[in-house]
Image (tube, grey):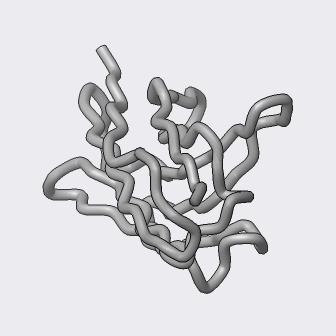
Amino acid sequence: QVQLVESGGGLVQPGGSLRLSCAASGIAFNTHDMAWYRQAPGKQRNLVAKIRASGGTNYADSVKGRFTISRDNAKNTVSLQMNSLKPDDTAVYYCNAQGFITAYWGQGTQVTVSS
């Protein structure tokens, strides 16, 4: 049974930082590309950052220079360090694991940026 469990969301003031983590089980973690997506109310789910099994990364333009994705293959975890947060970053953040055929999703964690 595949599980992706996110943690680390919460309420933060503009300019603040949060670190999201996703613990994966039931998959061969080191063979999967891992990513973070987010979905704001009334909007579609969009890619925030991806880290490939090879270690290569890519980011949405809106978060470049502020967010950093990383993975620990020994612990089967992927993290998203979010700095200089803005109100527009408010959304539910989802962890994603992409295998050769199948994609898996976590349940999501809420991030709210507000003063």
Pick whichever, 63 or 33, lies toward us: 63
Q: Which residue is pictured at 73% across the width and 39% down the height?
A: 40
Q: Could you say where residue 84 lies in the image, as x and y percent from the top left?
A: 55, 78
Does residue 77 appear to the left or right of 90 in the view shown? left
In the figure, 67 relative to 92: above or below? below
Residue 65: name its quadrant.
Answer: bottom right
Q: Which quadrant does the N terminus fall into?
A: top left
Could you tell me if residue 98 is visible in this image? Answer: no
Q: Which residue is pictured at 24% across the width and 62% down the height?
A: 72
Does residue 52 appear to the left or right of 78 in the view shown? right
Q: Could you say where residue 2 lies in the image, as x and y percent from the top left?
A: 34, 21
Pick whichever, 23 or 30, lies toward us: 23
Question: Which residue occupies the extreme top position in the image?
Answer: 1
Q: Which residue is pictured at 82% across the width and 35% down the height?
A: 44
Does residue 81 appear to the left or right of 92 in the view shown? left
Q: Could you say where residue 22 lies in the image, as x and y percent from the top left?
A: 34, 44
Residue 85: name its quadrant.
Answer: bottom right
Pick whichever, 65 or 16, lies toward us: 16
In the figure, 100 relative to 75: above or below? above
In the figure, 17 relative to 21: above or below? below
